[in-house]
Image (tube, rainbow, N blue to C red):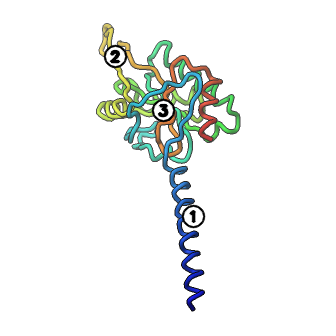
Amino acid sequence: MKRFFSTGLIWLLFVIPAVGTAGWILWREITEPKTIAGPGLIQTDAAIGGPITLIGADGQEVTEEAFAGGPAVIYFGYTYCPDVCPTSLQTITEALDLLGSEGQAVTPIFITVDPKRDGTEVVGDYAAAFHEQMVGLTGRPEQITAAAKAFRVVYLARDKGRSDDDYLVDHSSYYYLMDANWNLAAVMAHEITPAQMADAIRQLM
């Protein structure tokens, strides 16, 4: 009886800590953001990202939970954007093409900063024109403001023309790479190439 107690105690002293350590490592792998590096990536200690509540092309409310389980690339812009936005979304499209079958696990997300003109169908069709997987999101002005604030996106309407719907929107132009848990993995510069973006995304897979 004494020998059994001693052996059992020794087993507990070694096995339980080992199991606990393995569990802690697994928990870290699942929950902690993965650090990635490479050309075109901006190093920052700023708190960027967070929950979003927006509206999808079908008119239904969408939160970040809809994109859990795989990487996501977010870009803020607007459909009337003359050049910067189309170029940026094309970069995402080409990056996904370079990833091949791996790209099927990635969700590209286009969030408008111009909800007045970019309704649900407009933003949905615009996003889909660049890639079949691309999700277009709009929302009420306060929802767009909250999402932009979470990602530190700056935007401002200017150069109003003859009508209330004739204007441009100045906005910051970055890509936000999120991991499967909606943690920020990287801020990508506007100048990043499709190949560099594909390499960054691949590091999350």
- Along the viewing direction, whichever of 57 and 101 lies nearer the viewer: 101
30, 135: nearer the viewer = 30
122 relative to 70, above or below: above
In percent of width and height, residue 181 lies at 49, 46
At 31% across and 7% down in the image, what residue appears?
162
Would you call the spot at circle 1 few (<14 residues within 10 Å), some (14-19), or many (20 or more)? few
* Residue at image coords 32%, 12%: 158
Residue type at mark 2: give it: Asp
Q: CA distance from mark 1 to mark 3?
A: 46 Å
Q: Which residue is mark 2?
A: 165
Q: Which mark is residue 136?
A: 3
Q: Secondary structure at mark 2?
A: loop
Q: Which residue is mark 1?
A: 18
Point out the image quarter for the N terminus.
bottom right
Q: State the residue at coordinates (54%, 71%).
A: 13
Above or below 31: residue 188: above
Q: Nearer the viewer, mark 1 or mark 3?
A: 1
Q: Does the CB distance between marks 1 and 3 fall below 8 Å?
A: no
